[in-house]
Image (tube, rainbow, N blue to C red):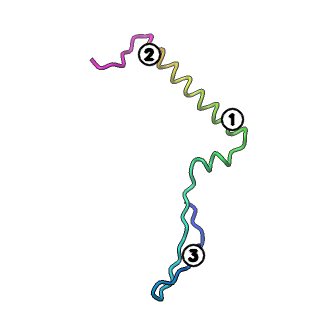
Amino acid sequence: MVVGDCSVITVIEGVNYCLVVIREQSWLDEINKMSFAQLSALLSFAALVWYVASSIRTMLHVLGADNSKE
C-alpha cells in the first residue's frame, strides 16, 4: 500500500481531521511498468505453461485416465 501525506484537512466541531488517501497497487500497475521485453517474456511463459498443461492433460487422457466419477 502506498500512503501519502494528508490529502485533505477537515475541521469538524473544532477538531482537525487529516484524511489520507490509501491506494493499493494492482497487478495492472505492475504490468504497465514492464518493458516490452519483460511483457513479451511473461506472455511467452504463460503460453508455455498452458501448452505444457494441455499436453499433460491430453497424454493422461490417451493413457486411459478417467475424469468422470462412476
Q: CA distance from mark 1 to mark 2?
A: 30 Å
Q: Are marks 2 and 3 in contact (CB under 8 Å)?
A: no
Does the segment drawn in magenta span residue 26? Answer: no
Q: Position of residue 46 (x, y in %)?
A: 59, 32
User: Would residue 63 be found to the left or right of residue 53 on screen?
Assistant: left
The N terminus lies in quadrant: bottom right
Task: Name the dominant secondary structure of the magenta segment.
Answer: loop
- Residue in the image at 43% along x and 10% along y: 63
Image side of residue 55 versus residue 29, left or right: left
Q: Determine crowd level at label 2: few under 14, some 14-19, many 20+ residues with C-alpha closer than 10 A.
A: few
Residue at 72% x, 40% y is 36
Instruction: Examine the structure image and report whether residue 69 is included in the region drawn in magenta.
Output: yes
Residues at discs 1 and 2 in contact (Cβ within 8 Å): no
The image position of residue 42, as x and y in percent, is 63, 36
Q: Which residue is mark 3?
A: 8
Q: Is residue 27 above or below residue 19?
A: above
Which class describes the residues within 10 Å of circle 1: few (<14), some (14-19), or many (20+)? Answer: few
Q: Secondary structure at mark 3?
A: strand
Relative placement, left or right, of 5 versus 69 is: right
Q: Depth check: 1 or 19 in front? A: 19
Q: Is residue 11 above or below residue 1?
A: below
Residue 19 vertical position relative to residue 46 in the rendered view, above or below: below
Q: Amino acid at mark 2?
A: Leu
Which span is picked out in magenta? Answer: 62-70
Residue located 59% across and 68% down the image: 4
Residue hosting label 1: 40
Res. 68 image quadrant: top left
> Which kind of residue does numbered mark 1 sit on?
Ser
**Residue 16 placement (x, y as % from top left):** 51, 84
- The residue that mark 2 highlights is 60
Looking at the image, residue 19 sits to the left or right of residue 68; the answer is: right
Q: Say what secondary structure mark 2 lies in.
A: helix
